[in-house]
Image: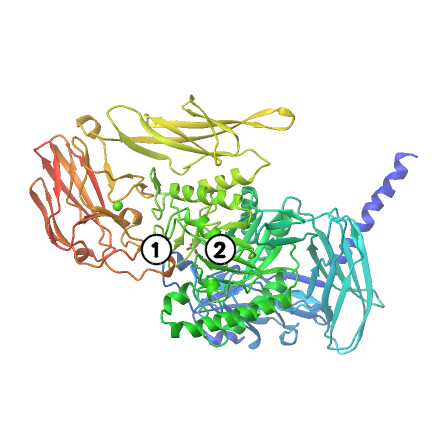
Amino acid sequence: MSKEKTFPARKLRILIPMILFLSQTVCAQHESKTINDGWKFHKGECEAAASPAYDDSAWNSIHLPHTWNTDAYTEKKYYQGTGWYRRTLTLPQHWQDKQVFLKLDAASKAAAIYINGKEAGEHNGGYTACTFDITSLCSFNSPNSLAIRVDNARQDIPPISADFTFFGGIYRDVWLTAVSKQHFHLTNHGSDGIFISTPQVSEEKGTILIRGEIKNDAEQKASLELEHIVYNPDGSIAQTQKQSIQIKGGELYSFHTETAPILSPRLWTPETPHLYRVESILRDKKTKAILDRSNHHTGFRWFGFDGKTGFSLNGKPYKLRGICRHQDQKPIGVALTDEMHRRDMMLMKEMGANFIRISHYPQDDALLEMCDKLGMLAWEEIPIIDIVPDTPGYAENCESNLREMIRQHYNHPSIITWGYMNEILLVTQRRYKKEEELKPVLERTLALANRLEKVLKEEDSTRVSTMAFHGSNSYNEVGLGNITDIVGWNLYQGWYGGNLTGFERFLAEQHKKFPSHPMIVSEYGAGSDKRIHSLQPNAFDFSIEYQQKYLEHYLPVLEETPYVCGGTHWNFIDFSSALRDESMPRINNKGLVYSDRTPKDVYYYYKAAWREDIPVLHIASRDWIHRTGIQQGEAPVMLPVKVYTNLPEVELFIDGKSLGKQKTENYTVIFEVPFSRKEHFISAKAESKEAARNLRTIEDGIHLSFTPAPANLNETNLRNLELAVNVGSNCFYTSDESRLTWLPDQPYTENSWGYIGGESKSSQTQVENTNDGPLFQTLRNDIEGYCFDVPNGVYEIEFLFTDIFRENAATAYQLGRNSDVESRENCFSIIVNDETVEEDFSPCRESGYFHALRKRYNITNFRNKIEIRFPVRNGKSFLNGIKLRKLY
Ligand code: GCB
Ligand code: CA
């Protein structure tokens, strides 16, 4: 056969299906598009805006996704109230004989929708979608007015109390859909009315059950044909099922089909996320015209939770290596684009996680899609947190939000558990101390839990139910402990209180008491701030190094305790919590990545532990690029450098010179490194054994700047030195704004410098008038003096003060951390070398409590020593920071 003859035939083979495909899409019978553009927004109430006549020309032009709460990054009392959105809707003529639906993927917390001044519907719940049939309200010949009132102040809709910001607005996509009069049940709680499960599943065979409803919105009866096509993961057709349906005008028809067994199905796992696709097509029986069409992915997998042996996937023990994920990103709030959600999923997957706790509320469909496609088991929950209020309507809204979440995300094979309460006794017990006050709250909490458990099982018998508790046995005592199938424990031993080993002790105690309760460590984490570093890290110092230490303790326990199903680190990101103060006000900084998703060191610790398939080598304390340390004479300063790796041995180099090799333990290697120059290059090398015994060298390197802080001050080293001390703290603090590093404090010794007397104290309350809060949040209480043994000359001395001695309404989430700070009045003098520079001075009288104050003096030193005293008139003396510079 000649070439010329075969060519057209081949071309046709490609062209015909293409033409068929194109003709189907062009005249698609289910048209869906986003309407995220062309919106006007007004912050505040404006009832008149529902009317089509309303003039919104003065409003802001915005795009969706949108939130009105970027103020939550600066204000504790961010705006909680009403916002209005408006837009025109011009519908194509050919939609005239169709059914038109409007879908909001999320509007927080409640939305009321008006078309041409008439209410199309309302929705309570800020994290689930809602769909409305707007056909009868629309005109197809002239533009329609669409107005949506959104409200994030509602107290009858969860969440009402929690450690995160309740961002308001239409912050996910809005969709417009047109279909034929006969269609799938698109207003079924925000789902598309099709539910897929795998009633039979094993290595040998699996079946797919497809349930759903068809609605006939025409007046006449219809003869329809429903076809389901199941596609294999490679795209080939595995099976088709067809049935005929007769449906009267205005009726809803339920269908229910189980496929024949699919033999040796390709199982879905995080490592092999094989997806089957189910396409459901609704046709006119006579003309065969397509009326509606839907596509969903499903997967064959089964799982088990066991009190003794933990979690298993497809019959094999499987450790849940997870993270919790909030959905915001500074500075845009929750108005994330789909690709931002997908980026987070890719980062989590890259780290080696196989499990996500979608906390504390249902999240974007884009995220769920990626859970299925990338392979990430999932726990999804609704935000009933801290306490159950007796607000009328609250329980009903919880129930409907639970149904919506389950129906909307039912088809995702990645989901294994649904949750509905988080730390529900935390605020309950704090607020109601008396037995008789507590009783009714506990009763309604239990009633709601039992009610939701029933709804959950009614909606979905294929997954397990869960709740997350804080580290207190009272959940068991009040009867919450045995309602759900599994329990989650949020544990912070060694952070909010106690010590690190309290973690494994708590788990062991629970396991002993309730050996058949499967448990997940649903939260654990420690805050960190890249400006803060420490060689002796402590809980709540917010140093990068304490976060490392905390997780290096927790992770091995999770990995090595067989009865623990797994854990979900709190949180994947530094997230918005407007109520929080601490080192970064308005931010909960327990993230493995910063708000902008740059990984912190601990991200690589997990990656080293979890990625068995690739070599990982990371020099830690990566953010600490301006290092400093106390130098004795000219000797190099020895500072530890940590490397996270999954390779057995690491060699470290400073400026190309080897410091030898060390064996890895707990994915960690620490070297003592001599720092002596202004600029250093630190590099690490390790051998990775690849296939066929090929050795490959893996390397990492960082440039660091080093500024020694002299232990003994003299003419030479004082030149250009700015000796800054973070009084009352063990931590190095580097200001973002000046780049100056404030050293950890030290006691005074002869020929050196340091404090005399007193004790360290700290506060978690935000300090006003500065962006260097952590520097001012630590102080030396009851300090007697400060001394610098320095040569004669003229010096500039600066004192940093912030009075923290006032009882402060700390948020519940600090779990009593601040409560050891007494309330008192403080007044003292500052005397430098017998000269009174400040008499009976009261920092709080001068500027208020929790207010940063800096005072600078020029001092002439005649005694080869600067000796500072703080004689007290009232209360106690204190000092938060000190800085010395020799002028001449
Ligand atoms: C918890 C809460 C979570 C908080 C977290 C924390 O237990 O469930 O919402 O953000 O602790 O950081 O304190
Ligand atoms: Ca300080």
> Residue 510, which numbered label?
2
Point out the quarter of the image occupied by ligand 1: bottom left
Look at the numbered disc 1 and say if its residue's Cβ is closer than 8 Å to ligand 1.
no
Q: Give the farthest residue toward the top.
A: 657
Q: Give the farthest residue toward the front.
A: 512
Say which of marks 2 and 1 sits in front. Answer: 2
Residue 624 in view here: yes
Q: Amino acid at mark 1?
A: Asp
Residue 28 in view here: no
Q: Residue at x 85, y 68 (%)?
A: 286
Front residue of this view, candidates 713 and 74: 713
Q: Amino acid at mark 2?
A: Gln
Q: In the picture shown, does residue 117 fall above or below 405? A: below
Mark 1 or mark 2, which is nearer the start of the sequence?
A: 2
Front residue of this view, candidates 417 and 778: 417
User: Alpha carbon of mark 2 to alpha carbon of mark 1: how far?
Assistant: 32 Å
Q: Position of residue 483 (x, y in %)?
A: 55, 65
Secondary element at image label 2: helix
Q: In the picture shown, does residue 168 fall above or below 855? A: below
Q: Position of residue 176 (x, y in %)?
A: 63, 65
Q: Quadrant of the N terminus?
A: top right
In this image, 511 relative to 827: left or right?
right
Q: Position of residue 121 (x, y in %)?
A: 58, 74
C-beta proximity under 8 Å, tags 2 and 1: no
Q: Give the farthest residue toward the right.
A: 1
Residue at mark 1: 581
Q: Quadrant of the C terminus?
A: top left
Secondary element at image label 1: loop
Q: Dot 1 surroundings within 10 Å: few (below 14), some, or many (20 or more)?
A: many
> Residue 475, which numbered label?
none
